[in-house]
Image: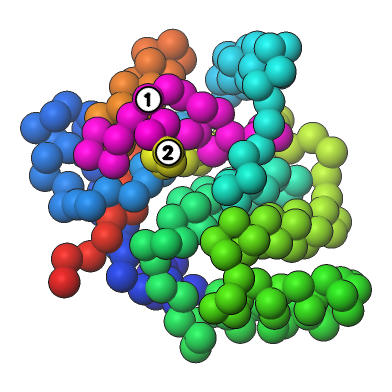
Amino acid sequence: MFLDQFGFEGVEFNELFGFDPELISCVPGPHLALVFCYPYREKAFEYRKGIYGQLVASDKGIVPKWAFFTEQFIANACGYHAMLHAVLNNLGKIEISANGYFAKMIEQFKDKKLKSEETEEIEESTSSQCSSEDFVSRMTDFFSKISLEGSETDVSGKIDHHFIVFIVRDGHLFEFDSLQKFPRDCGPSTNETLLLDAGNICQELMDHLGEISCSAIALCAKEN
């Protein structure tokens, strides 16, 4: 429903029933992203804070130039951010319909508080001459401005469940968490082992939190 309404074509979400290789093999590929949902308690907040704090301390807290990344400022908007992270970091494999909600949303936001030169950049970003890196850079700035309107300074205590996303880029697995300030490099991976490698990280999180009430869906390219 989300993909159809937004006008993202050639992809679909499929439910993942577990991270065992046998269950992963049931999910049709190619696999583009894993979206993981888990209960967000105080224990989860402290655990995640420690992981990302170590990256900041070691000067690894950066957003790659190729990445579309937006930080969450509104409570319970993590699912929306997760879907955008999953889709817009796979632009080369996804078509955007000119008649879809995403294209129309860009037009509507042009009438808001963005300066004229900023809206011109958004128009340029949808042209065929614009590179993928230029597009995601402009979209990141664009959605960051939108998210900041009516922003809240602390959303962590208001969230019951949280969504994070995993994708593969340049031979590495990256985790996108909208409550953080940058995506996390989780180490080497491939498109073929994306779900397995991301599943291992999700399983570690579940084991640490002692939670089994989690769910996952995979963004997959449709077979022609």
Amino acid of disc 1: Pro
SS at mark 2 in the image: loop
Question: Residue at the location (79% across, 35% down)?
Answer: 154
Residue 191 drawn in magenta = yes
Q: Residues within 10 Å of mark 2 (few under 14, many from 20)?
A: few
> Relative to 66, is 4 on the left or the right?
left
Residue at mark 2? 170
On screen, residue 217 above or below 130: above
**Compared with residue 74, is residue 99 higher up or lower down, i.e. above or below?**
below
Q: Residue 147, percent across and down?
A: 75, 56
**Can you say whether 219 is above or below 46 in the image?**
below
Q: Can you say which quadrant of the picture contains the N terminus? A: bottom left
Residue 215 position within the rendered picture, expressed as x and y whole percent measured from the top left: 35, 38
Residue 189 visible in the current orientation: yes
- Which segment did they paint magenta? 171-193
**Residue at x 55% of width, y 61% of height:** 132
Q: Quadrant of residue 92?
A: bottom left
Tell me if I can see residue 80 in this picture. Answer: no
Q: Quadrant of residue 119?
A: bottom right
Is label 1 in contact with label 2 (beta carbons under 8 Å)?
no
Q: Nearer the viewer, residue 164 or 45?
A: 164
Does 196 lie within the magenta span?
no
Q: Residue at x 84, y 38 (%)?
A: 153
Residue 31 spot, x, y in % from top left: 27, 48
- Please rate how many residues cluster around mark 1, counting C-alpha atoms within 10 Å: few if below 14, some from 14 to 19, many from 20: some
> Which residue is drawn at the image coordinates 82% and 83% (left, top)?
111
How far across and down, in percent of the image, does residue 128 sit? 54, 78
Front one among 20 and 127? 127
Residue where numbered disc 1 is placed: 188
